[in-house]
Image: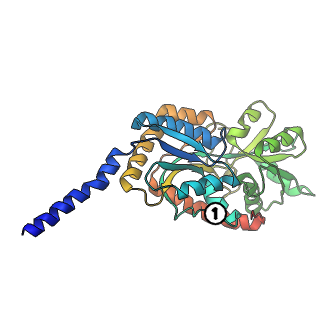
Amino acid sequence: MILHRRTLCLGLLALPALGVRAQTWPAKTVSIVVPQAPGGTNDALGRILAQKLTERFGQTFVIDNRAGAGGNIGTAAAAKAPRDGYTLLLTISSTQAINPALYKSTGFDPVKDFDPIAPVGVVPNVLVVNPSFPARDLKEFLTEVRRKTPPYQYASAGNGSLNHLLGEMLNRAASLSLEHVPYKGVAPALTDVIGGQVPMAFASLPSCIAHVRTGKLRALGVSSARRSPALPEIPSISELVPGCVGELWVGLFTGAGTPAAVVDRLAAEIAVITASSDVVEKFNAIGAEVVRGGRTQLAAMVKEDLARWDPIVKASGARVD
């Protein structure tokens, strides 16, 4: 009987250890790896979140920009970090769901290496044209592109980028034959569309909205499933081309195997943060929309986009070794 009591006592003493770790987390600075360069949409959203998390936890959350190889460098680093909740990953769908099909080796597994915490935001791409383009709206655009020989060209941020693949998706869904012209980044691509060297491009809303508002570019459609609050007069491409939907989402992850209590606390706090009106306003100001959801929703988003983009990447012939 005494032996049983000793065993029970030892067990009870051991049980709180994991709970104490979870309760005292975070006891030091938490790093949020952003696998893109400073100044981009993901970085901007990350800094808003880091400030809010710092306020709510009373502990510092800092952004750690680790750009390179389309996001693979920072993502692989986050996958290799200790699974203790002190290294998080704030990444975008193109890195997590397109790169596995695009690169021969990414250095990480988008599903096995990470535990999803919560989706954070979504950013649509916009089909923009030079103001001299003969089509005034999306319906006229489809008619014009179908009749044109040789085919119109469209600019993108580079081979395998989301805006490249959106053009391929539109070609497949609407039976078009747009010809891809890759650039080294979205800024030079938009410069040439504005200058008339290339007639059109797909570009993220934050990167092109100022040009649309000043009339340097004409917006014809957004790639999201519904219209964007930032450009409510511009239709979703899927209104005329069913199934042609491709958004850039931003999600928060941690390494697989991080204590569940830590992941649950983070998910709960993100839910509160993304429900606040000031965060919604700050996201909207840079062309993003808040996404409210939990671990299950983010896991489903990864799975759906892996299945969505794999055949499109293969059909495009884009490959990075």
Instruction: Give the residue at x 61% y 54%.
Output: 93
Give above or below for 23 relative to 243: above
Between residues 192 and 12, which one lies in front from this camera angle? 12
Q: Of helix, strand and loop, which one carries label 1? A: helix
- In the picture, which quadrant includes the C terminus? bottom right
Q: In the orientation shown, which residue stands out farthest toward the right?
A: 150
Q: Is residue 179 left or right of residue 242?
A: right
- In the picture, which quadrant includes the N terminus? bottom left
Give above or below for 237 relative to 102: above
At label 1, which amino acid type do we have? Arg
Q: Is residue 137 left or right of residue 86?
A: right
Instruction: Give the residue at x 54% y 36%.
Output: 48
Give above or below for 210 relative to 120: above
Q: Quadrant of residue 320?
A: bottom right
Q: Position of residue 82 (x, y in %)?
A: 47, 55
Q: Position of residue 63 (x, y in %)?
A: 56, 41
The reply to whether residue 12 is in sight is yes
Instruction: Give the residue at x 54% y 50%.
Output: 89
Rendered image coloring scheme: rainbow
Q: Position of residue 200 (x, y in %)?
A: 82, 46
Q: Quadrant of residue 212?
A: top right
Q: Which residue is mark 1?
A: 308
Q: Position of residue 55 (x, y in %)?
A: 43, 33
Give above or below for 85 relative to 40: below
Q: Is residue 39 left or right of residue 168?
A: left
The reply to whether residue 94 is in sight is no
Instruction: Give the residue at x 45% y 36%.
Output: 54
